[in-house]
Image (cartoon, rainbow, N blue to C red):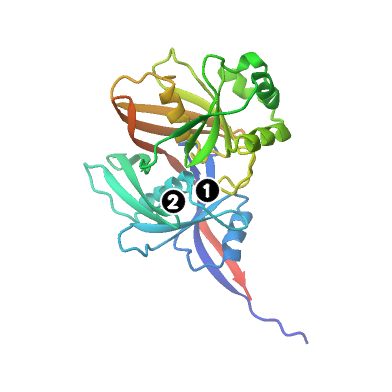
């Protein structure tokens, strides 16, 4: 007779959240596990793989005595830095699950502890309905700009575009907001949809110019709504929260840099001290997300910057992790 050990099960509360959207199955998916900080690395990464997600967040109690809660972010294989996508998705769940208390009639500030520091989020609500979450970015380091080595025809070829699809009236530059990114302004929204990536040439472009992201965008300056349509590529493949995907899955990492570039070159109306832009970002999975960036300027100099959006929960349940 063969002895069989009795299996025991560990159970976790699990949510699947679509971030930077109010629509299910748009934006960027995120696995959120409430109070799962005691799980092992293998258990955490197995949950993410089991949910067929690129990333997951595990929420626990803060250890600094000041923050409302703590999160750790993981890819399918390892712990990664916490990006804006993870901050907004986890805070959305903590609010909707009533794990943090909001005061009526005021703008609430929620602080989230991560391994990379503490991030404050502004919570905008109307009555009991959550409207928007905005992350206050650390603005001690201003945006840096530098020229890059490029040829318009070669840039277009790397993207499967015609040279006339890339604007010639605006200088293509690299911008640093935490990460160096190349900014490529396009002449039409249609050009974004017909991009055909030449992986090797885009990798060469990123390597030669020492950047992580290549940001393509279109903005209609004749319209007052400040909508910016964009796609973002990560040829370096660095594990910066993008999950090692060649095209950014709508993480929000590159949008402050695009906003700073657009502001610098006056590609959107900038009357008044507060500029609000809505990024409509497309991923290679065909999903569409909306990322909000707010900038406060004084004498044409950006003094404050916020990034945010909304989220929606598409799955709420429990997962059993069998142990022997």
Residue in the image at 37% along x and 44% along y? 138
Q: Quadrant of residue 99?
A: bottom left
Mark 2, Cα crowd under 10 Å, few <14 / some 14-19 / many 20+, is many
Q: Quadrant of the C terminus?
A: bottom right
The percent coordinates of residue 140 (x first, y second) are 36, 42
For the residue pair 163 and 20, the one nearer the viewer reads as 163
Question: Contact (CB < 8 A) between labels 2 and 1?
Answer: yes
Q: Earlier in the sequence, mark 2 or mark 1?
A: 1
Residue under numbered circle 2: 90
Q: Is residue 226 visible?
A: yes
Q: Quadrant of the N terminus?
A: bottom right
The percent coordinates of residue 183 (x first, y second) are 54, 28
In this rendering, would 205 be left or right of 241? right
Residue under numbered circle 1: 30
Residue in the image at 62% along x and 55% along y? 76
Taking the view exactly as shown, the residue that stands out farthest to the left is 105
Q: Height in image: 2 above or below 33?
A: below
For the residue pair 251 and 98, the one nearer the viewer reads as 251
The percent coordinates of residue 200 (x first, y second) are 73, 35
**Distance CA(mark 2)–CA(mark 1):** 9 Å
Badge 2 marks a residue whose secondary structure is helix
The percent coordinates of residue 111 (x first, y second) are 34, 52
């Amino acid at each position: 007779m063969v002895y069989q050990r009795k299996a025991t099960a560990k159970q976790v509360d699990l949510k699947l959240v679509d971030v930077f959207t109010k629509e299910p199955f748009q934006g960027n998916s995120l696995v959120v596990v409430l109070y799962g900080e005691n799980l092992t690395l293998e258990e955490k990464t197995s949950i993410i793989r089991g949910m067929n997600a690129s990333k997951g967040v595990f929420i626990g109690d803060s250890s600094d005595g000041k923050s409302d809660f703590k999160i750790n972010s993981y890819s399918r294989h390892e712990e990664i830095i916490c990006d804006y996508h993870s901050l907004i998705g986890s805070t959305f769940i903590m609010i909707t699950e009533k794990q943090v208390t909001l005061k009526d009639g005021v703008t609430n500030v929620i602080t989230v502890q991560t391994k990379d520091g503490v991030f404050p989020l502004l919570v905008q609500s109307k009555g009991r309905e959550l409207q928007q979450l905005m992350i206050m970015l650390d603005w001690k380091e201003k945006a840096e700009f530098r020229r890059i080595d490029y040829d318009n025809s070669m840039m277009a070829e790397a993207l499967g575009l015609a040279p006339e699809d890339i604007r010639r009236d605006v200088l293509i530059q690299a911008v640093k907001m935490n990460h160096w990114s190349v900014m490529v302004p396009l002449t039409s929204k249609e050009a974004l949809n017909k991009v055909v990536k030449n992986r090797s040439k885009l990798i060469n472009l990123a390597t030669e110019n020492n950047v992580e992201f290549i940001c393509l965008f279109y903005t209609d300056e004749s319209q007052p709504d400040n909508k910016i349509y964009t796609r973002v590529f990560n040829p370096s493949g660095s594990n910066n929260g993008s999950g090692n995907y060649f095209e950014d899955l709508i993480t929000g990492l590159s949008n402050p840099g695009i906003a700073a570039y657009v502001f610098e070159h006056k590609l959107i109306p900038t009357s008044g001290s507060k500029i609000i832009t809505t990024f409509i970002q497309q991923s290679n999975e065909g999903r569409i997300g909306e990322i909000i960036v707010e900038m406060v300027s004084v004498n044409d100099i950006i003094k404050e910057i916020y990034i945010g959006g909304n989220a929606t929960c598409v799955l709420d349940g429990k997962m059993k992790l069998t142990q022997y």
